[in-house]
Image: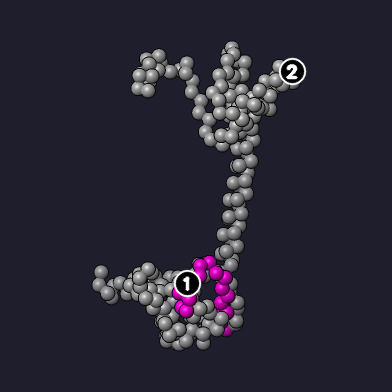
Amino acid sequence: MDESSFNRIARDILESLYYFVAIDCEERITFIGREYAAYLGYGQEALIGRPVREVIPNTRLPQVLRDGKEELGRFMSVASQKSGSRVLVSTVCNRLPIYRDGDRYRGEIVGVMAEGVIRDFQDSNRLHEEMELLRHQNELYQSHLAQLYQVESGLDNILGSSPVIQKLKGLIGRVANSTITVCISGETGTGKELVANAIHKLSKRSEKPFVKINCAAIPKDLLEFGALRL
């Protein structure tokens, strides 16, 4: 790509940014977006070369130039002179040092730029509403998941109040706090899986995956092969 083509593309990119302005080490404006200049009530060419404080009195660009530290996601107010009336537009912007050859680690600071992250707080409000909706949905999903997890794995799923059941629940609680291997025996349909789920739920590893393997469904030859590999 030749230099003229690169400059044309770079200018198109800068013009597409909201409230874009750049200054040099003398705190003079080297570039300002057409839309930003119009908001301030000027044409672009009228602002190029002027001290930035004359155009934007409350700007922090000189401060960033002195400190060499970027400012990200900062509140900014723009006094718009568009359409003959003064309107205060609030937005969020990033202020970044400009380094020679783009080398932020070894390069020399040759200026500072600022860009609006959003056009105005109407856009920000919509973003906030969408984030609140996602947060609410996430809380709802987490609540449903907790309920399902409790139903599938908690002691409440072991029904009964007889002394035998109470003794079993107490035993489950004691076993769950240990790291010993547990063998649960009983006839089909007596609730062995419920006991296993309850132990896992009450253990310190309750948030880890509970992997169930149906050994009866594994062919004998495959078990023998696995034993030989071990």
- On screen, residue 163 versus residue 77, left or right, reads right
Give the class, few, some or many, for how many residues have Cα within 10 Å of label 1's Cα (few <14, many ≥20).
few
Q: Quadrant of the N terminus?
A: bottom left
In the image, which disc is placed on residue 163?
2
* Label 2: element kind: helix
Q: Quadrant of residue 81?
A: bottom right
- On screen, residue 13 versus residue 183, left or right, reads left
Q: Which residues are magenta?
A: 65-84
Q: Position of residue 29 (x, y in %)?
A: 44, 83
* Magenta stretch contains residue 119: no
Residue tagged 1:
69
Q: Position of residue 212 (x, y in %)?
A: 51, 25
Residue nearer the viewer, 29 or 70:
70
List the single residue furthest toward the left.
Answer: 2
* Label 1: element kind: loop
Q: Quadrant of residue 101?
A: bottom left
Q: Quadrant of the C terminus?
A: top left
List the single residue furthest toward the top.
Answer: 187
